[in-house]
Image: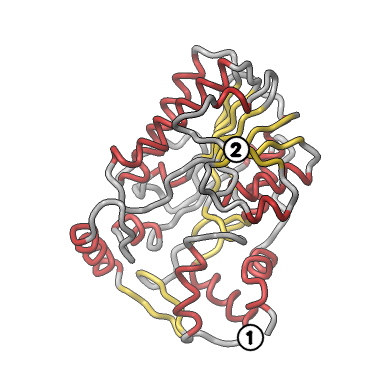
Amino acid sequence: MDVVVFGATGYLGSHAVEQLMIAGHKVKCVVRPRSDIDFLKSISADIHVVDFENSDLASVIEKGCCVLNCTADTRMHLSDLQRSKVEIDLTSHIFNVAAAAGAKRFIQLSTVMLYGFDRPDHAIDEQYPPNPKYSYSRIAARRERVLLDLAEASPMELIILRPSNTLGKRDTSALPAILPLLEKGGFPVIGGGEWRYSNADARDVGRAFAHLVDLTIAGSEIYLMKGYDISWLDLKAAIDNILGRKSRVFNLPRGLALVLGGVMEFVFPFGSSPPLTRFMAETLSSNTLFDDSKIRSTGFLPKYDLHETLIDALGEKSLH
């Protein structure tokens, strides 16, 4: 199927494009005028530069195609209004344009963070009710509700994918935040680091999108996706093994991390990038486990384990 990807220069969007191309789909990458398209050029992607605010998006969407939306404002410190401009307003606009253009299917990149942090210690599935606490989670949950409502009145099929935490090349958050301290021999954790969470290789997220493009569905569907379950200390041990050196655990108590995050949110204005927020502190100090049996039952299986993920993500740093 022809696939039109919005947000193709983003972290997971770029992996989606790469894996869709590997799977043999004809992919059209829709990017903003000032986007960094170096990676897309390196894989000979079909790039269409579009001004989202002033251009007719229908010109890049053909009847019967699949539209994959990976657009997102990934900044952690935003007001609900600021975050809604991309997550809600732009997403709704792309959906409506795609439906009017006769697209067959709309696939939306979502997040497991919409479940909030009031969750059990065991793995939860798609039926567990979202309980968002912070802006990032609230707007993600609202985006899904808006899309599901739009899909009710549209002949276009809707699939929402909620990937677990991810690691991979072109990541701008997880590993880049850890590496500076790792270079000095430390590994940062909050609340001891024994918290377990579901993780995935970014390439497997891209593979999941490629799988969902052709999947037969009845009505709107939501899928969780993960690769493996680990703890932050498991991640530390794996990185130590790959880099060939033993790092020291730098532990920040959970209560102190939440207080510091709250102070930084107050001091830093919306739109800036505080080194820590309460959302970040809870993400790093909560069990975050998911059951992705639903997507696996359709025939999708992740390909990469933690070691393979880190070898690829760390690149030259892994060659010790």
User: In the rendered structure, which amino acid carries the disc numbered 1?
Assistant: Gly
Q: On the picture, is 38 further left or further right than 186?
A: right
Reading the image, the residue beneath label 2 is: 30
Asked whether the beta carbons under mark 1 and mark 2 sit within 8 Å of each other, the answer is: no
Instruction: Determine the residue positioned at 55% across, 71% down.
Output: 234
Query: Picture quarter containing residue 61?
Result: top right
Q: On the picture, is 201 further left or further right than 54?
A: right
Local crowd at mark 2 within 10 Å, few (<14), some, or many (≥20)? Answer: many
Residue 286, percent across and down? 39, 58
Residue 54, percent across and down? 46, 29
- The alpha-carbon separation of the residues under discs 1 and 2 comes to 41 Å
Considering only order in the chain, which callout, 2 or 1, is on the residue closer to the N terminus?
Answer: 2
Instruction: Determine the residue positioned at 57% across, 25% down.
Output: 158
| Residue nearest the viewer, comparing 278 with 40 | 40
Reading the image, the residue beneath label 1 is: 244
Q: Secondary structure at mark 1?
A: loop
